[in-house]
Image: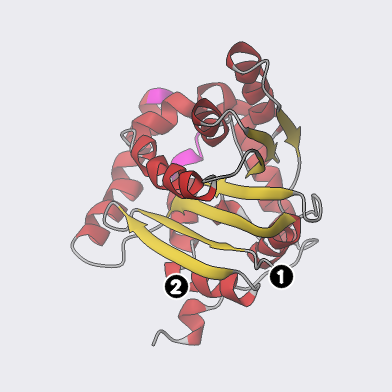
Amino acid sequence: MKNLIETSIKDPGFDSKQAILRKQYMRDLFKTQAKSYDFHDDVYGFGAHHLWILSLLSIIKKFMFNKKSTRMLDLACGTGFVTFNVAKRYHNIDIDGLDISPHMITVARKRCDKKFKDRNINFWVGDAELSYGNNKYDIITTCFAFRNFTNKHLAVENVFRALKPGGVFIIQDLTKPEYQPFKSIYLFYMKYILPIFTRILGSERTVAAWLYKSVMMMPTNIAIKMLLEDKRFENVFCKKQMFGIACFIGGYKPEK
């Protein structure tokens, strides 16, 4: 059994200095990165997220069985990678995208106007740590952003509140492998090789350091699983992806 220190997740508070500074950093970072975010992401991760999203789509496929229509929230949606992958495959899912960065939302809206203009897809600037509705969505996803949330308890509580009974919540994110030798290889890449890529691509100068720091701060899979169960999610699932580089965790809001 893992000890409580290893598995616990603590919130510093919505109005804490830590939360305020991190959110401002996210806004400032993506102000410069938004237009090139997807290309840079493909390079940094060698396109792995295009494979990882198949797990998310598999859960949605099972969830959509015998459903005529559903409503989905792509939380911390960025430029709409998850939104558009879901929209391409399911014409009966209406999607809202929410992100704290207005510049990422601007890019997502432009892409939506080009390829999905006739669909009920909307993008909004918003904070995952502020309430965005009650019993409103059937599906809520947050991909490659959960580690950036300062108040994870608060974010998960908002998700639970916004889901309809029986709805599903899916987290997909980068994390650190737990076992050697892959852990050392991966962290060496993050700490020493990734900064070379960011300099070559002309990324914002703090990108590599933040990616490494955010991965190191990411709670363990078991800690996130325990958090969801503590917030009353049922049938919580937890899966490592690519030797533990990424995690795939989620659960369901009880029907009653």
Stretch of the chain drawn in magenta: 201-208
Give the crowd class for mark 1: few <14, some 14-19, many >=20 residues within 10 Å.
Answer: few
Q: Position of residue 215 (x, y in %)?
A: 44, 55
User: Which residue occupies 51% across, 23% down?
Assistant: 36
User: Which residue occupies 75% across, 61% down?
Assistant: 161
Disc 1, SS: loop
User: Which residue occupies 62% across, 48% down?
Assistant: 139
Which amino acid type is shown beneath numbered disc 2? Ile
Relative placement, left or right, of 50 versus 121 is left
Please give the residue where the numbered disc 2 appears in the rendered image: 222
In the displayed structure, 242 sits above or below 218; it is above
User: Which residue occupies 26% across, 60% down?
Assistant: 183
Disc 2, SS: helix
Give the crowd class for mark 2: few <14, some 14-19, many >=20 residues within 10 Å.
Answer: some
Q: Position of residue 105 (x, y in %)?
A: 68, 29
Task: Tell which of 121 and 199 is nearer to you.
Answer: 121
Q: Position of residue 61 (x, y in %)?
A: 47, 44
Q: Place residue 104 in its image quadrant.
A: top right
**What type of secondary structure mainly makes up the magenta span?**
loop
Q: Place residue 123 in its image quadrant.
A: top right
Relative placement, left or right, of 251 versus 165 is left
Q: Place residue 177 in its image quadrant.
A: bottom left
In the displayed orientation, state which residue is furthest to the front: 66
Task: Tell which of 90 and 131 is nearer to you.
Answer: 90
Relative placement, left or right, of 92 versus 195 is right
The magenta stretch spans residue 175: no
Please give the residue where the numbered disc 1 appears in the rendered image: 256
In the displayed orientation, state which residue is furthest to the top: 114
